[in-house]
């Protein structure tokens, strides 16, 4: 158990230890309707060309474009035989290469012309055999669901990371637990929230219980009389670090129980959010076998000042390509809820001057 005066573990070391405990969870197959926002366990490729043949893109009449060239209401072209009426998605009859709108035909007379290929989808134009629809480790979004369904896939293999969120000793638990649960789910995890009293035994039992791939203990990570989370973790497993060189979030910690990673999140909103962004989200990505999102960049409207030796999370608000720093530690809630991202200042920097282009992590 760490004493308040002990050295803080560097953020990079804490993250490396967590990742060392985080083997990707076993994949499972789910229907497409349950796959949104989950992490793909394997790549999926199209197994057949779509469409397999030329198809109509709109309702009308299948014609050969060259046969009605120059047709107009003033110069109708008499068709030798009545054209086949088609609807969007129908295969094109042999010898036709365009779809004439319904208003372009009066009886057997074409009164409008169309170009070759107009109103027609060529074979393989939507998807070709072998096209990659979904990459392993990719988050499954609406566009992936469209492609998978169009290719005839009814289910997909995912890695669903089960996170147990143990809420104890939290400053405003009604506010923090829903926020963390939403962030976990947005990161591709499934969350089970368990509220326990500030009791090491109760905390330890919640941590040791089966059914989770990792546990986040929310609150009670400090050194006050009612802060018992680290003690509860020690009773169920091992505390690897209690106190990290992260601001806000110095009282965060890491450990393991039953071979599963455990993350101690402070109970104040700014520190809880900072520790989740710096450690929780990368841990979920490692358990899911997912690549972490590529950070966006923006230009600072004002400078960011930071303390050398500590990794610092600074919450920001985006204004187009510009970034407005809101602050980090002890940020009032009314400002924190304006944040739509954060900048991680590495421990070797004193910050960034105004006008710098910096990387930001979206919330």
Image: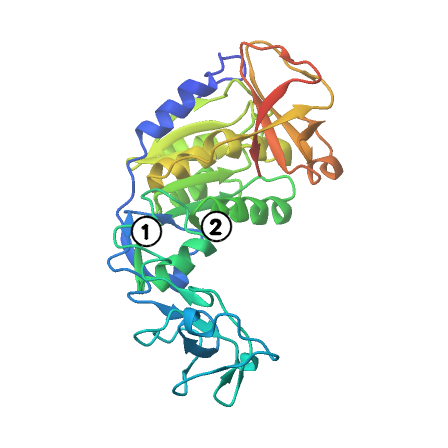
Q: Where is residue 106 in the image (x, y as percent from the top left)?
A: 54, 87
Q: Provide the residue designation for mark 1.
A: 158
Mark 1 is surrounded, within 10 Å at the Cα level, by few (under 14), some (14 to 19) or many (20 or more) other residues, namely many
Q: Provide the residue designation for mark 2.
A: 194
Query: Which residue is depicted at the point 41% across and 39% down?
Result: 284
Q: In this view, does 334 lie above or below 34?
A: above
Q: Quadrant location of residue 259?
A: top left
Query: Which residue is depicted at the point 58% across and 10% down?
Result: 349
Residue closest to the eye, 68 or 60? 68
Mark 2 is surrounded, within 10 Å at the Cα level, by few (under 14), some (14 to 19) or many (20 or more) other residues, namely some
- Indicate the secondary structure of the residue bearing disc 1: strand
Q: Is residue 139 above or below residue 256?
A: below
Here the colouring is rainbow
In the rendered view of the protein, which quadrant contains the C terminus?
A: top right
Q: Nearer the viewer, mark 2 or mark 1?
A: 1
Q: Position of residue 89 (x, y in %)?
A: 40, 73
- Indicate the secondary structure of the residue bearing disc 2: strand
Residue 224 at least partly seen: no
Q: Position of residue 297 (x, y in %)?
A: 58, 28
Whichever of labels 2 and 1 marks the residue nearer the N terminus, that label is 1
Residue closest to the eye, 276 or 93? 93
The tag on residue 261 is: none
């Amino acid at each position: 158990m760490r004493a308040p005066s002990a050295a803080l573990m560097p953020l990079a070391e804490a993250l490396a230890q967590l990742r060392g405990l985080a083997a990707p969870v076993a994949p499972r197959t789910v229907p497409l309707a349950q796959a949104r926002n989950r992490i793909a366990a394997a790549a999926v490729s199209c197994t057949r060309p779509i469409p397999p043949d030329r198809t109509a893109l709109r309702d009308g009449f299948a014609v050969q474009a060259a046969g009605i060239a120059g047709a107009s209401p003033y110069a109708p072209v008499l068709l030798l035989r009545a054209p086949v009426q088609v609807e969007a998605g129908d295969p094109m009859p042999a010898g036709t290469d365009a779809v004439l709108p319904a208003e372009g035909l009066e009886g057997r007379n074409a009164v409008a012309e169309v170009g070759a290929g107009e109103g027609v989808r060529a074979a393989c134009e939507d998807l070709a055999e072998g096209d990659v629809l979904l990459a392993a480790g990719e988050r499954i979004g609406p566009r992936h669901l469209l492609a998978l369904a169009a290719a005839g896939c009814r289910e997909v293999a995912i890695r669903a990371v089960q996170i147990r969120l143990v809420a104890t000793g939290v400053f405003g638990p009604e506010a923090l637990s829903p926020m963390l649960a939403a962030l976990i789910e947005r990161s591709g995890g499934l969350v089970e929230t368990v509220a326990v009293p500030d009791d090491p035994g109760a905390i330890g039992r919640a941590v040791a219980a089966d059914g989770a791939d990792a546990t986040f203990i929310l609150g009670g990570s400090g050194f006050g009389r009612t802060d018992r989370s680290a003690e509860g973790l020690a009773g169920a497993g091992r505390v690897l670090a209690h106190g990290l060189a992260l601001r806000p979030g110095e009282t965060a910690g890491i450990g393991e129980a039953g071979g599963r990673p455990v993350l101690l999140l402070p109970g104040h909103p700014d520190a809880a959010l900072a520790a989740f962004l710096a450690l929780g989200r990368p841990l979920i990505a490692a358990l899911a076998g997912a690549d972490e999102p590529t950070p966006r960049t923006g230009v600072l409207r004002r400078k960011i000042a930071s303390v050398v030796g500590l990794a610092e999370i600074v919450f920001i608000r985006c204004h187009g390509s510009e970034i407005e720093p809101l602050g980090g530690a002890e940020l009032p809630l009314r400002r924190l809820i304006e944040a739509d991202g954060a900048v991680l200042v590495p421990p070797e920097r004193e910050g960034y001057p105004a006008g710098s282009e910096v990387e930001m992590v979206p919330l």
